[in-house]
Amino acid sequence: MFNIPPHSFYAMLVVLGLLLTASTSRLILARRKPDKDYTELRQRIQSWWWMIGILFVCLVISPTAAIILFAFISFLALKEFFSIVPTRQADRRVLFWAYVSIPIQYYLVSIGWYGMFIIFIPVYVFLLLPMRMVLIGETKGFIHSAGTIHWAVMLTVFCISHIAYLLVLPIENPEAGSIGLVIFLLFMTQFNDVCQYIWGKLLGKHKIIPKVSPNKTWEGFLGGVLTIALVSGFLGPYLTPLTFRFSLLAGLLISCSGFIGDVVISSLKRDLEIKDSGTLIPGHGGILDRCDSLMFTSPLFFHFLYYVNY
């Protein structure tokens, strides 16, 4: 059983408290305005309870359980990606090797083999997949398929696996442990989405990229960046080995990269002419809808933390 460090334990309690507050607020709203439909809000909050509950249980059980959870998330995300992005019939045998990369990548995480973890997908899988495609002998659509499959594996397996690798880093903040690193990254990434949404609703006037995401504004983006930087500055030293100054930089990095991840996946969905990537998570859509920002914040935060402290 994983011994929960005190700072991480208190952070978990705060997150559960926020969820309880959200659930209570939703009930109060439903009683005060019974004529309004709060179904989507109820679904969103219930889904958050399930997602956070499963995450916390796995983190408490052991690092291995949490690593397996993230591997399963990568599998669901990759499967969802291939379900919405068209691939050639001939590529079915190639997709098998894309899925095989998941257990190998997360095994490398579990044994802490950083050197192979960091190059396995960008080098070996990158070279293997087109070689397998060549053996099939179908050249029509080759470039499109190679790019699609490579990008899918990079986003859903390589990027997300960086969250799991935080669990095997040498602990330099014993009061928070490796759990603190994961909680910090996940909380700040999701909080960034909320902050940019709220600031955009309050002050948003100047759109950034209206053709991709009409609701994204400069006011929302900058308000979110400043908020996340300040919150990270104070929360970082509590949950990570980062000092106040480096925590500020981590917040800036998470906020900017989270925004980019959001709009990149939005561009993907607009190209495919779909609203959500799936229906797996009630009120949220699919796995890609929930992990869009994380796929960009995870590797960037990991390497920032790794080179600053490890």
Image: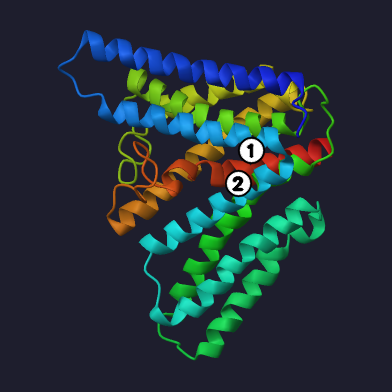
**Which label's residue is closer to the chain start, 2 or 1?**
1
Q: Is residue 34 above or below residue 214?
A: above
Q: x, y (%) of residue 27? A: 32, 14
Mark count: 2
Quick one: 218 or 97, which is closer to the camera? 97
- Within-10-Å neighbours for mark 2: few <14, some 14–19, many 20+: some
Determine whether, in the image, residue 151 is placed left or right of residue 124. left
Q: Quadrant of the N terminus?
A: top right
Q: Are marks 2 and 1 in contact (CB under 8 Å)?
A: yes
- Residue drawn at x 51%, y 61% is 152
Q: Is residue 297 above or below residue 146?
A: above
Q: x, y (%) of residue 29? A: 28, 12
Q: Amino acid at mark 2?
A: Leu
Residue labelled with disc 1: 58
Q: Amino acid at mark 1?
A: Cys
Q: x, y (%) of residue 43? A: 34, 31
Specify the farthest residue to the front: 1
Kind of element beneath mark 1: helix
Quick one: 119 or 48, which is closer to the camera? 48
Q: x, y (%) of residue 114? A: 80, 54
Q: Quadrant of the C terminus?
A: top right
Marks 2 and 1, how far apart at CA: 7 Å
Q: Is residue 23 above or below residue 142?
A: above
Residue labelled with disc 2: 69
Q: Is residue 50 above or below residue 98?
A: above
Determine whether, in the image, residue 73 is placed left or right of residue 67. left
- Residue drawn at x 80%, y 41% is 169
- Residue drawn at x 75%, y 19% is 6
Determine whether, in the image, residue 3 is placed left or right of residue 16. right
- Residue drawn at x 72%, y 24% is 239
Q: Is residue 206 visible?
A: no
